[in-house]
Image (tube, rainbow, N blue to C red):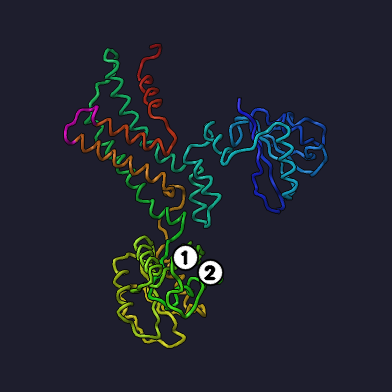
Amino acid sequence: MSYTIAAVSTGNVVSAIGIIRLTGDDCAAIGGKVFTLNNGMPLSEAPNRKLVLGQLHDKEGRVIDSCCAIYSRGPHSYTGEDTAEFHCHGSPAVLSAGLEALYMAGAKPAKRGEFTKRAFLNGKLGLTEAEAVIDLIEADTADAAANAAGQVGGRLQKQLEPIYDDLVNLCSHFHAVLDYPDEDIEDFGLASYESSLQKDAAALNVLLKTYNQGRILKSGVAAAIVGKPNVGKSSLLNALAGYDRVIVTDIPGTTRDTVEETVMLGSTKLRLIDTAGIRETSDTVEAIGVERSKQAVENADLVIFVCDGSKPLDWQDRDIINLCLGHANVIALVNKTDLGCVVTPGELPFGHVIHSCAKMGQGLEHLTSVIGAMFAGEMPCDGSILTNARQADAIRRAYDAMLSALDGLSLGLTPDAVLTDVEEAMAAMGEVTGATVREDITARIFERFCVGK
């Protein structure tokens, strides 16, 4: 028995349509207390997965909306349980009153993610698919949505299943021979699995390498804007954000801490980080900001170095240039060109030098195209890219355990020692897929027996 839960699934905003969802064993009985079909039929007898017209009532029995309902019988529903939805006019007051009536009728408030959690527990979604649901909801770009939709469709799960299956075969074979020596089971030879382990470790490594692109796809490019005080860093952030996000003055040290703002630059999502001007200072608070600016450079996917093009580069500019030199992705922005320009591209040892006037919005189109080219993805956004930090950590641990198993194999360690690493890899992969290692191994062991044993 699963108790019935209910929630508004479309948010608390005015909209054309608002949906109240409930699921659980008493779904039809509880829903039928607040929704009456126009044809007089009880909700429990409504045709499966077809919209029906009726009236929604509040807790006092008053009609508060003429709307549609759809009743999906388990297991052919999102959660695998009986599920009902009321498609109402999108008034928050109507949705709230309808939800309160369902609570009075016996439904319990749904917890965060509980509908998808039930779908996972009832085998309707794998763990990777369930986690991708929220990624799809929160996607900011078409590429991110396409990749999340692919994962909801099971693409990542399908990539991992054959690897996990190989490891289950290996472990179950070993345990079957060890625990049932009198059975007619093929002798276990660890060396025969070496090529399979190498292939599976390589596949995990290929998947793991997609995470850097996946992280950017999901969270955006972390772009640190750096330079000495009063070169126009905050003006640049404001221009890209489209409003005055940061205070801009002629006083050096106005920005004393890192300030973040997420913007869409063309088709690229940027997490802009406006940093404190990097300079020597005796001000304790400003010095902390300068140190954070240096950390921002180290952690950024992209560094935008800004200098005042109307003045010659000085030692402070050159110190910051040296700080940026080791970074893979750097764009130099020669700013304030409306005041004249004395800085030449040859003075800046970077592959991309753009002249701009951030205050007037000049040069931003060129900046957009350069950034778009730098981070244009070549991998298909079809669900095969790792975007989840938790999943990436688990895959990394699985890969490390596989390498350890292969090292043990080459050193001639006993099978039980090698299989300790293999089972560690399986456990890590199980954190991604939701699989339970011991149950799978046990099931596979008895698949090797004859019928009737």
Q: Amino acid at mark 2?
A: Arg
- Residue extending furthest toward the left: 411
User: Vertical placement of 156 versus 338: above or below?
Assistant: above
| Label 2 or label 1, whichever comes before in sequence order | 2
Q: Are marks 2 and 1 in contact (CB under 8 Å)?
A: yes
Q: Amino acid at mark 1?
A: Val
Residue 378 image position (x, y, % from top left): 40, 57
Residue 82 image position (x, y, % from top left): 64, 31
The residue drawn where x is 42% and y is 88% is 340
Which residue is denoted by mark 1 in the rendering? 259
Give the Cα separation between the discs numbered 2 and 1: 9 Å
Q: Nearer the viewer, residue 234 or 123?
A: 234
Q: Nearer the viewer, residue 432 or 452?
A: 432
Relative horizontal placement of residue 443, taking residue 22 as reference (left or right): left
Highlighted range, magenta: 410-417
Relative horizontal placement of residue 395, taking residue 41 as reference (left or right): left
The residue drawn where x is 32% and y is 77% is 316
Q: Quadrant of residue 191?
A: top left
Q: Is residue 412 magenta?
A: yes
The residue drawn where x is 77% and y is 36% is 35
Q: Is residue 233 magenta?
A: no
User: Vertical placement of 357 versus 110: above or below?
Assistant: below
Relative horizontal placement of residue 267, taking residue 348 as reference (left or right): right
For label 1, the SS is: strand
Which residue is denoted by mark 2 in the rendering? 245
Residue 425 image position (x, y, % from top left): 33, 36
Residue neighbourhood size for the residue with mark 1, other residues' Cα within 10 Å, grouped as few (<14), some (14–19), many (≥20):
some
Q: Nearer the viewer, residue 235 or 70?
A: 235
User: Vertical placement of 265 versus 165: above or below?
Assistant: below
For label 2, the SS is: loop
Residue 379 image position (x, y, % from top left): 41, 54
**In which quadrant is the C terminus drawn?**
top left
